[in-house]
Image (cartoon, grey):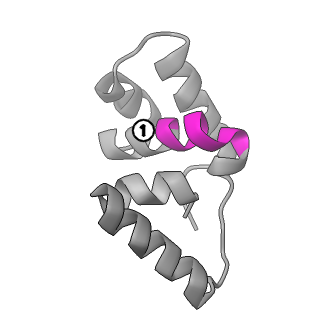
């Protein structure tokens, strides 16, 4: 379980997007890492609040292959692909 609640993540996104704090400033205020803030903002921008909800699911072989194919064709990193597919 994440040590940051859904509300914490929304607050961090607000600090970054609306209050114009930097990733680093936001991370310090929220007791999070800079990479956490970057990930939350990217997920929020791509999927809205739904992207911040925890997901515990099993993925089909087809879905996994779709992700790997996407990564191969676009050259996307694991992190970039996780944002696109909300995983």
Is most of the magenta stretch helix, strand or loop? helix
Give how far across and how far down residue 6 sits, in percent. Answer: 67, 46
Residue labelled with disc 1 = 37
Residue farthest to the right? 50
Please tell me which residue lies in front, 7 or 47. Answer: 47
Position of 72 relative to 45 (above/below): below
Range of residues picked out in magenta:
41-49
Please tell me which residue lies in front, 33 or 42. Answer: 42
Please name the residue shown 63% across and 86% down the image.
60
Residue farthest to the front? 73
Please name the residue shown 54% across and 64% down the image.
87
Please tell me which residue lies in front, 19 or 39. Answer: 39
Position of 30 relative to 60 (above/below): above
Give how far across and how far down residue 79 sits, in percent. Answer: 36, 57
- The total of numbered circles placed on residues is 1
Q: Please tell me whether mark 1 sits on a helix, a strand or a loop.
A: helix
Whether residue 1 appears in magenta in the rendering, the answer is: no
Give how far across and how far down residue 28 sits, in percent. Answer: 35, 31
Whether residue 47 appears in magenta in the rendering, the answer is: yes
């Amino acid at each position: 379980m994440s040590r940051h609640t859904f509300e914490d993540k929304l607050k961090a996104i607000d600090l970054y997007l609306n209050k114009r704090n930097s990733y680093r400033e936001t991370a310090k205020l929220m007791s999070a890492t800079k990479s956490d803030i970057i990930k939350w903002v990217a997920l929020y921008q791509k999927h809205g609040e739904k992207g911040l909800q925890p997901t515990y699911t099993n993925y089909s072989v087809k879905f996994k292959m779709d992700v790997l194919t996407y990564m191969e064709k676009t050259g996307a990193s694991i992190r970039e692909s996780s944002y696109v597919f909300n995983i």
